[in-house]
Image: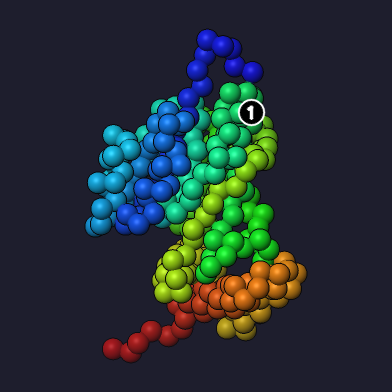
Amino acid sequence: MTSSNTKVTLSAALIVKNEAKNLKVCLDSLTGWVDDIIILDSGSTDDTQAIAEKYTSHFYVKSDWKGFGLQRQAAQNYVSTDYVLWIDADEVVTEELKNSILTAINENKKQTAYSINRKSWVFGRFIEHSGWYPDRVTRLYKVNEGRYSDDLVHEKVLLDKQIIVENLQGDLTHYTYDDLHHYLVKSASYAKLSADQKEQRGKKTSLSNASLHAFGCFVKMYLLKRGFLDGKQGFLLAVLSAHSTFVKYADLWIRSQPKRPE
């Protein structure tokens, strides 16, 4: 426990680009209870900056994008509080989660980080199965005890060895896709970054391997993770995820094929 004379401080940190549509609702859910908001932009061309500056004076730009992991590391360098809470612009902190976070900060346990449960709204409903819920991610930790990995995509929080992770109560609402076009664009971007990362690590694949991974993805999401209980959205997500998985491996395979002749 922290002493009554010591105030433990908390920053919310975001990396953003062209998030004008989502940012206000996200920042509204942080206003009044976090001590600081850190926003690192990677080159927005919409009203992201104007919206952000209504909530914080700590808005920065780093447009030389080198992947999600390094961008989060750069954002954390601006954090001067005891704890950092990571949140994306398309996420909203619920009241129950806010209270759980504040309780954890006030307790200020030694060598402890916290995981948060995301609940995603996709194509007209909250997804409660499909391997998407519960969806626990480590998002709250002491600044001097954790950092993000260098990964281009699917970056992870790396904690000091002695740190334990406890689960917080309450959901982080995640409005992940606006429509099918948004899904396809976002998925294509992640697929490319994933292939980039695998290529950099010297990995190769085949189309048969791509097909097996895609089939396995569908079976896991729709049957093993009971995606069928998420109705038509569950079926659609399983099909789309299988497609995205195939594209990710197919992209990597294509890179190993003969180049266009001169």
Q: In this view, does 243 lie to the left or right of 53?
A: right
Q: Is residue 178 above or below residue 246?
A: above
Q: Is residue 125 left or right of residue 128?
A: left
Residue at 68%, 63% in the rendered image? 129
Residue at 53%, 68% in the rendered image? 124
Most extreme residue toward the top is: 5
| Quarter of the view holding residue 242 | bottom right
The foreground one among 103 and 42 is 103
| Label 1 environment density (alpha carbons within 10 Å; few <14, some 14–19, many ≥20) | some
Q: In which quadrant will I find the N terminus?
A: top right
Q: Where is residue 131 in the image (x, y as percent from the top left)?
A: 67, 63
Let me know if residue 221 appears in the view: no
Q: In this view, does 121 lie above or below 222?
A: above
The foreground one among 225 and 254 is 225
Q: In which quadrant will I find the C terminus?
A: bottom left
Q: Position of residue 105 (x, y in %)?
A: 57, 27
Let me know if residue 88 appears in the view: yes
Q: Which amino acid does the dot numbered 1 rest on?
A: Gln
Which residue matches tag 1? Answer: 111
Residue at 70%, 73% in the rendered image? 228
Q: Position of residue 53 (x, y in %)?
A: 27, 40
Most extreme residue toward the right is: 224
Q: What element carries label 1?
A: loop
